[in-house]
Amino acid sequence: MQLWSRIERFMALSWARAVLLVSILQVPANCQVVKTSGGGYFHTVGFESQYYPIGGYRGTRVLEHNQTGRYASYVEVSWSQAAAIDGLGQIWMVDKQYHQVILVAPRSQYFDWPSYYYDYAGQRGTPGHRDGSRKLALFDSPMGLAVGNDGTKPVIFVADTNNHVIRRLEFASGRTTTIVGRPKREGLVDGKGLESRFKFPMSLGVDIALESLFVLDNGKKLRYVDMRTTPPTVFTLVGGACRMALGTESVIRYGTIIARTVACHPDWLATAAGEEVGITEEDVKCMGHISTCAPRVFPALGDKHSKYLVQPPEELLAKVLEIPRIMAAMKSKG
């Protein structure tokens, strides 16, 4: 009887006390130390905190967040929703109803405050997907954007929600580019560029160096876009990898535009924590322009100007460059 009485009292403990008891007894079920791609270490079921030793834990890791120097990578980003302000004081907005990116100047000819907007990119009331000039580009219900600066020129990243992609819009040239995700192909797949998959991306955060982009995707998934690679590479992070930076407060402009300084750990990979995420494998290297897998020789748009060109092996490139000479020789003989 005494044994059963003790068991009943144990079962009556609250969940919080049970977790504390497990942590004190140091019973890290199914706990395995894993080295991340960034060089950091954590347990697959709960990182290093004694409060996350339970097998299969998939919650947030708030107790370990924002500890500078503890992890291999720690990035602070400016996180916004449907509106943001760039370094020139311009207001950028996405209009999901009319499928456009909107620009509001900081002042106009008649007023010294933001009072006039114009359609900057996308065609009003026309959903779709098209890259290129801002006036010809098409979006489909974009719901979030983030603004950074490339020198003195703003760069806008757009969560093109119903297209399941992330777009880059350069203010200097007015060009729109899809950087990650494939239009109208939803999913949760990590990988490079257009081979990755998103599902209704909602909001974004970008760092000051324009190297790291973080996306709220798939309802509540955090996706990390490493823009230091060509093309950019997508990784899925565990819940809680991004949180408000300690000692910061939200900045509210014009009553409704909210910007938050958010701290993210890009090395808190979901795959290392045991979560299931699709990962693409590069089986075939595309030679030449990535959309056609063929060399492009137009003078103004040659392969040397293609930022996302996948370079072929040197010996194969040499053979391709010989094709025009061989064709000319055959023509002269014929």
Image: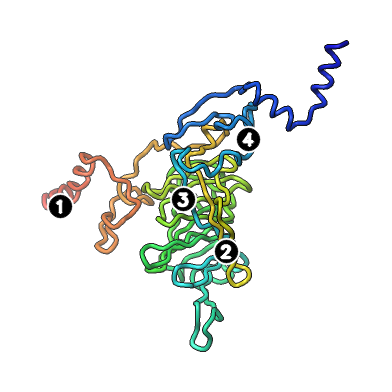
> Residue 218, which numbered label?
none
Residue 131 x/y as whole percent:
44, 61
Residue at 62% x, 46% y is 220
Residue 109 x/y as whole percent:
49, 87
The residue singled out by tag 4 in the image is: 58
Which image quadrant is residue 143 in? bottom right
The residue singled out by tag 3 in the image is: 180
Q: Amino acid at mark 2?
A: Val
Question: Mark 3 or mark 2: which comes first in sequence?
Answer: 3
The residue singled out by tag 2 in the image is: 251
- Per the model, the C-alpha gap separating discs 1 and 2 is 65 Å
At numbered mark 3, what does the secondary structure look like: helix, strand or loop? strand
The residue singled out by tag 1 in the image is: 328
Residue 235 x/y as whole percent:
49, 42
Question: Mark 4 or mark 2: which comes first in sequence?
Answer: 4
Residue 57 x/y as whole percent:
64, 32
Q: Amino acid at mark 1?
A: Ala
At numbered mark 4, what does the secondary structure look like: helix, strand or loop? loop
- Per the model, the C-alpha gap separating discs 3 and 1 is 40 Å
Answer left or right for 18 relative to 144: right
Question: Mark 4 or mark 1: which comes first in sequence?
Answer: 4
Residue at 52% x, 89% y is 110
- Per the model, the C-alpha gap separating discs 4 and 1 is 63 Å
Hey, which residue is sitting farthest right in the picture?
1
Q: Amino acid at mark 4?
A: Arg
Placement of 276 over or under 114, stated as above or below = above
Mark in the foreground, 4 or 2: 2
Residue at 32% x, 50% y is 309
- Per the model, the C-alpha gap separating discs 4 and 3 is 26 Å
